[in-house]
Image (cartoon, helix red, strand yellow):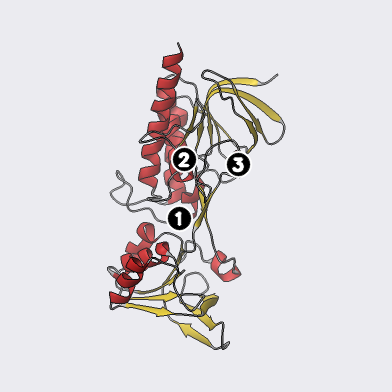
Amino acid sequence: MAEKIKCLIIGSGPAGYTAAIYAARADMKPVMYTGMQMGGQLTTTTEVDNFPGYPNGTDGTAMMNDLKNQAERFGTDVRFGLATKVEFSKEEGGVHKVTVDESTDLEAETVIISTGATAKYLGLESEQRLIGGGVSACATCDGFFYKGQDVVVVGAGDTAAEEATYLANICSKVTMLVRKDYMRASKAMQHRVNKTENITVMYNTEIDEVLGDNVVEGVRAVNNQTGDKVDIPVTGVFIAIGHKPNTELFKDVLDMDETGYLITKGKSTKTNLPGVFAAGDVQDKEYRQAVTAAGTGCMAALDAERYLGALE
């Protein structure tokens, strides 16, 4: 027999936990399945200094534990598990079927999707080892820690150009490593990069290795045309080659844009199916901040509560 749930939250992180807090306080008895990375992307961030309410800063894992404890205090049933199959109803008031870990069947009146997005990395052993020790995928999250220092940005699109110009206001020198002999960024963004004095762009260049034992001390860059290698002393490495929304499960079920982000209606968190809502980075490729994710988590719970209220 499938377990019947009023409000099912798929995924944790700031969006999921905030949705859980609001849903629990509205007596929707939310059940959350956290996914494989309990707490989401933020648990890979060592220091969080820009979330309101933490005057001395905190670290990502501690902050997610705070949010989890708060959600549980109001009665959220937080479970470790991965949604592996969905069968969403197209009818108002219909039942949404979800399978967890390929074995547990659930029937939910409302579903809030907060599965987030995953930053793309280069996949180098040295890079993976130093994530949180100087390797980051978010300049607006971590740039402050590199004030007055030299950093590297890897990437050639608008995101990379944006991160480089953002960091140029904080850091003494920014070196952009571009794999091809041109940038993919829009002409406007390229002009901004070229006009910024403390940004240097190295074309046909890739990272061979991130240098340092416990913290980043530099990068070894290689020219992919000549094979020449050069060591660049830096304290921060920002990987800006894009994010991949965790939406594979909802392919051909929910409306998505060309890159896989869930599409929500207007200023709401409503998807194209009644009773199914999306919050956080799974539907936001613009801001991707913990505080904006938390905001949409609140919205999703309110949208779900109103949806149920309208059915009664």
* Residue at the spot 44% in from the left edge and 72% down from the top edge: 183
**Horizontal and vertical percent for residue 243?**
50, 55
Mark number, residue 251: 3
- Circle 2: residue type: Ile
| Residue 152 vs residue 183, the one in the foreground | 183
**Relative to 224, 71 lies left or right:** left
- Circle 1: residue type: Thr
Considering only vertical position in the picture, is 137 above or below 216?
above
**To which residue does mark 1 refer?**
45
Considering only vertical position in the picture, is 38 above or below 7?
below
Check the picture and name the quadrant holding the N terminus.
Answer: top right
* Residue at the spot 45% in from the left edge and 36% down from the top edge: 17
Question: Looking at the image, do the residues carrying marks 3 and 2 touch, with CB atoms under 8 Å apart?
Answer: no
- Circle 3: residue type: Lys
Mark 2 residue element: loop
User: Could you say which quadrant of the image residue 310 lies in?
Assistant: top left
* Residue at the spot 40% in from the left edge and 56% down from the top edge: 47
